[in-house]
Image: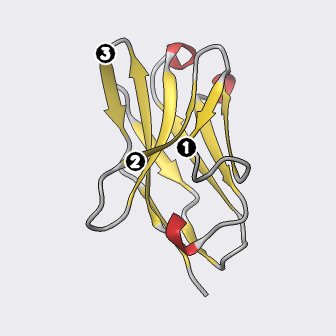
Amino acid sequence: QVQLVESGGGLVQPGGSLRLSCVASGSIFRLYTMSWYRQAPGKQRELVATIEVGGSTMYTDFVKGRFTISRDNAKNTVNLQMNSLKPEDTAVYYCKSRIGYSENWGQGTQVTVSS
């Protein structure tokens, strides 16, 4: 039902920054819980950050203090500001929406942290 399109991925050096964006279709974006996940080759997809309807956020311990998730309901957009990037942050990053028990995923955007 919901179409999610991520952008902003790319190649960055360790210690650098990158800002990911996810634009969603639909008229009830403000009611979605939005999350960013990532998946590296050979690894399970893991939760990175979540922002709830009310604006509360949560982060996995590995990115706390470095990543910031935010949303702009007027633009149907969720962002992930990634600072102090590490090589282990390299992965495909996916945007996910959830309302109730229904989930939708974007196609992903590649983030590569390498010198």
The amino acid beneath tag 2 is Glu
The amino acid beneath tag 1 is Thr
Q: Nearer the viewer, mark 1 or mark 3?
A: 1
Q: Nearer the viewer, mark 2 or mark 3?
A: 2
Q: Specify the label residue 60 is tagged with.
A: 1
Mark sitting earlier along the chain (2/1): 2
Q: Which residue is mark 2?
A: 46
Do the residues under discs 2 and 1 have CB atoms within 8 angstroms? yes
Do the residues under discs 1 and 3 have CB atoms within 8 angstroms? no
Residue 50's spot in the image, x, y percent? 55, 32
Give the position of the N terminus as an image quadrant: top left
Mark 3 Cα-neighbour bin, 10 Å: few <14, some 14–19, many ≥20:
few
Res. 1 visible in picture = no
Give the position of the C terminus as an image quadrant: bottom right
Tell me the CA gap for discs 2 and 3.
18 Å
Q: Work out whether 87 lies above or below 56.
A: below
Do the residues under discs 2 and 3 have CB atoms within 8 angstroms? no
Res. 63 visible in picture = yes
Give the residue displayed 63% in from the left and 42% down from the top.
79
Mark 3, secondary structure of its residue:
loop
The amino acid beneath tag 3 is Tyr
Q: Which residue is mark 3?
A: 101
Residue at the far front in the pictured view: 61
Residue 57's spot in the image, x, y percent? 64, 28
